[in-house]
Image (cartoon, helix red, strand yellow):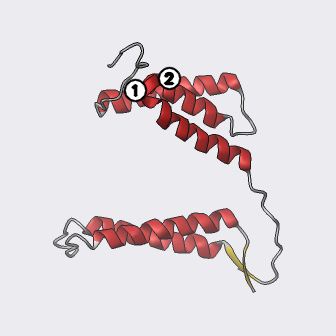
């Protein structure tokens, strides 16, 4: 009897399989070419094949033959709710509050999903990540996102 011994690896492998197949399917919309004369679809098709192979290997390694020693994995509702709600809040608050406050709220709310949540560490993490967001999205990519709340009327 075949059973799943490591559900995290099994489902991660399925995600790799899904994205690998998707990349290969979308790459066929472009000319693939050969190894000597690569077309624009060659690399995405090859990368999709690698993802497909990795997904297959990871999923198969998570399976086991023999008697199943099933342990029921509890569904962690609290982390899922905090992470999903933080992303939704970010989307809703980006225009009225700006990038700075929305990013800090996103990080603080999603940090509460952890059973090891500490406010001081989360605030430090929020400001370190905020710095990275500013450097990447505002400085290097020049996104036209309001930085400050709309009632302050500030842009970069």
Furthest-top residue in view?
Answer: 152
Q: Is residue 114 left or right of residue 83?
A: right
Kindly report the distance in space between the C-alpha atoms of the residues bearing marks 2 and 1: 12 Å
Q: Position of residue 73 (x, y in %)?
A: 78, 61
Quarter holding the N terminus?
A: bottom right
Q: Residue at x 62, y 33 (%)?
A: 109
Q: Position of residue 2 (x, y in %)?
A: 72, 83
Q: Name the N-terminal-most of marks 2 and 1.
A: 2
Residue 72 position (above or below residue 90): below
Q: Position of residue 15 (x, y in %)?
A: 53, 65
Residue 117: quarter of image: top right
Q: Is residue 46 left or right of residue 92?
A: left
Residue 91 position (above or below residue 48): above
Element type where label 2 sits in the image? helix
The answer to whether one can see residue 3 in this image is yes
Q: Residue at x 19, y 68 (%)?
A: 39
Instruction: Say which mark, if any, is on residue 117.
Output: none
Q: Position of residue 63 (x, y in %)?
A: 68, 76
Instruction: Say which mark, if any, is on residue 101.
Output: 2
Residue 132: quarter of image: top left
Quarter holding the C terminus?
A: top left
Q: How many marks?
A: 2
Q: Are marks 2 and 1 in contact (CB under 8 Å)?
A: no
Q: Residue at x 68, y 34 (%)?
A: 112
Furthest-left residue in view?
Answer: 37
Element type where label 1 sits in the image? helix
Q: Which residue is mark 1?
A: 134
Q: Nearer the viewer, mark 2 or mark 1?
A: 2
Q: Is residue 58 left or right of residue 41?
A: right
Q: Residue at x 22, y 73 (%)?
A: 32
Residue 35: quarter of image: bottom left
* Circle 1 Cα neighbour tier, 10 Å, few/some/many (<14 / 14–19 / ≥20): some
């Amino acid at each position: 009897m075949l059973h799943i011994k490591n559900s995290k690896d099994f489902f991660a492998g399925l995600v790799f399989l899904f994205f690998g197949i998707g990349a290969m399917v979308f790459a066929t919309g472009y000319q693939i070419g050969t190894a000597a004369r690569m077309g624009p679809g060659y690399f995405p098709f090859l990368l999709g094949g690698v993802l497909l192979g990795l997904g297959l290997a990871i999923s198969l390694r998570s399976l086991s033959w023999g008697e199943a020693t099933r342990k029921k994995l509890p569904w962690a509702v609290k982390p899922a709710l905090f992470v999903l709600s933080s992303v939704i809040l970010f989307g809703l608050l980006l225009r009225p509050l700006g990038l700075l406050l929305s990013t800090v709220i996103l990080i603080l709310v999603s940090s509460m999903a952890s059973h090891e949540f500490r406010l001081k560490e989360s605030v430090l993490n929020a400001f370190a990540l905020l710095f990275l967001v500013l450097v990447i999205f505002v400085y290097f990519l020049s996104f036209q996102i309001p930085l400050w709340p709309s009632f302050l009327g500030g842009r970069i």
